[in-house]
Image (cartoon, rainbow, N blue to C red):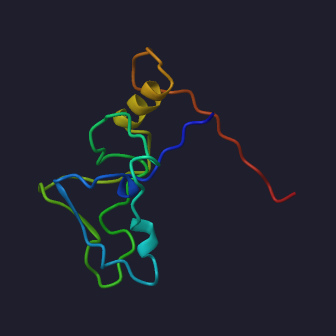
Amino acid sequence: MARGVARRGSSVPWPSGIVPYESAPGYGLNHNFAKYNSSEVDIQSTSYDYGSVMHYESTAFPSNGLPTIVPIQPNTTIGQRDNLSSIEIQEVRLFYNCTASGLTLSTIITTTTGD
């Protein structure tokens, strides 16, 4: 079984420090903010991961020029696309009962061509 990672904006529940503007996404994109129930998502009892590679940025799907997700605490950066966060790595290790330490995981990148 492979470990999947759900978007943090879709996991349950929204943390008390973040406000989703659920009416803000336009162009029929509200499904991107749909919630999974706790039987569909297992976050391994970790804290909410603002820095998740799977978290939408605050300006995802703007329809009116306003942010769609706003952290209540000022200067909190949400979402990034560079690396797995330390919490994501912790979730994978907990899921597979891995006792390794450090903040790296081996990555296999597979590409396909149109041939």
Q: Pick the residue in front: 50 or 40.
A: 40
Image coords of residue 108 (percent x, y): 64, 34
Q: Quadrant of residue 43?
A: top left
Residue drawn at x 40%, y 37% as measured from the top left: 88
Say which quadrant the N terminus sits in: top right
Q: How many marks?
A: 0
Q: Quadrant of residue 64?
A: bottom left
Residue drawn at x 42%, y 56% as measured from the top left: 36
Image coords of residue 107 (percent x, y): 58, 32
Residue 33 in the image: above or below residue 2 = below
Residue drawn at x 43%, y 51% as measured from the top left: 54
Residue 100 in the image: above or below residue 75 = above
Residue 10 in the image: above or below residue 50 = below
Say which quadrant the C terminus sits in: bottom right
Q: Pick the residue in front: 1 or 92.
A: 1
Residue 10 in the image: above or below residue 39 = below
Q: Is residue 99 found left or right of 65 in the rendered image?
A: right
Q: Residue furthest front?
A: 39
Residue drawn at x 15%, y 54% as measured from the top left: 75
Image coords of residue 2 (percent x, y): 61, 36
Q: Residue furthest right?
A: 115
Image coords of residue 105 (percent x, y): 50, 27
